[in-house]
Image (cartoon, rainbow, N blue to C red):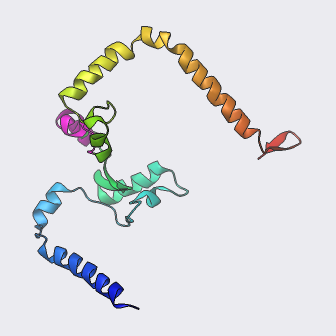
């Protein structure tokens, strides 16, 4: 092994060690006050997604987590963190007292680079989003506009069903009354 890979490895290890030492220490009280409990077993890229798969329905798995961690806990779904609230009292508090906090979308670099948060689906909650929602509700999603655009929906459904039928009929082996793919 050459000298360059060894020096590179030592430089990377030294850099991360120095960053770890220089990081300010978080006190235990601020950490517990700001974060909901999180189940063990999160993997680096997929988070807790592997815990939600399996034979049992997701509702049962989440119910077992509620029994273990309480009515509010957080899960990592991929790289995003999600808050799970299972008590109606806390849900009511989230949607009445703290509704503006929970109404906003997570900040993503994509929404910043694509039209500077001007896309309705990616815009953060605020005056712009409220104005665009009002315009969409009053102009685009009215009964008359939906009726005018019904032929577009019908043609899209027809083409989707036709594509699905062609895809299903490609490699079908029929035995008796049953078709097995």
Question: Left or right: where does residue 83 sit relative to residue 29?
Answer: right
Residue at (53% x, 58% y) in the render:
54
Q: Position of residue 120 (x, y in %)?
A: 32, 30
Q: Where is residue 42 in the image (x, y as percent from the top left)?
A: 37, 64
**Residue situated in front as seen by the camera: 18 or 178:** 18
Furthest toward the right, the residue is 176
**Residue situated in front as seen by the camera: 88 or 43:** 43
**Residue situated in front as seen by the camera: 164 or 51:** 164
Inspect the magenta stretch and tell me whether residue 86 lies in it: no
Residue at (23% x, 76% y) in the render:
16
Vertical relation: 3 (above or below) 158: below
Magenta highlight range: 90-107
In the rendered view of the protein, which quadrant contains the N terminus?
Answer: bottom left
Q: Where is residue 158 in the image (x, y as percent from the top left)?
A: 64, 23
Vertical relation: 179 (above or below) 39: above
Furthest toward the top, the residue is 144
Observer able to see residue 123: no
Number of on-image labels: 0
Vertical relation: 28 (above or below) 159: below
Question: Left or right: where does residue 106 sit relative to residue 24?
Answer: right
Observer able to see residue 67: yes
Inspect the magenta stretch and tell me whether residue 99 lies in it: yes
Magenta segment, prevailing SS (helix, strand or loop): helix
Q: Position of residue 36 (x, y in %)?
A: 24, 55
Residue at (38% x, 67% y) in the render:
41
């Amino acid at each position: 092994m050459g000298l360059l890979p060894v020096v590179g490895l030592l430089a990377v290890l030294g850099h991360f060690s120095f960053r770890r030492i220089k990081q300010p220490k978080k006190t235990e009280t601020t950490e517990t006050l700001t974060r909901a409990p999180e189940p063990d077993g999160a993997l680096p890229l997929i988070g807790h997604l592997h815990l939600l798969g399996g034979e049992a329905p997701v509702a049962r798995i989440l119910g077992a987590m509620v029994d273990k961690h309480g009515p509010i806990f957080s899960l990592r779904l991929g790289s995003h963190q999600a808050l799970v609230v299972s008590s109606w009292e806390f849900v009511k508090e989230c949607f009445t007292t703290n509704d503006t906090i929970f109404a906003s979308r997570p900040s993503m670099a994509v929404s910043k680079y694509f039209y500077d948060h001007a896309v309705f689906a990616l815009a953060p909650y605020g005056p712009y989003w409220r104005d665009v929602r009002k315009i969409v509700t009053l102009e685009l999603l009215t009964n008359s506009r939906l009726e005018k655009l019904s032929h577009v929906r019908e043609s899209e459904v027809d083409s989707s069903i036709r594509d699905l039928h062609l895809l299903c009929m490609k490699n079908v082996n029929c035995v008796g009354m049953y078709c097995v793919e």
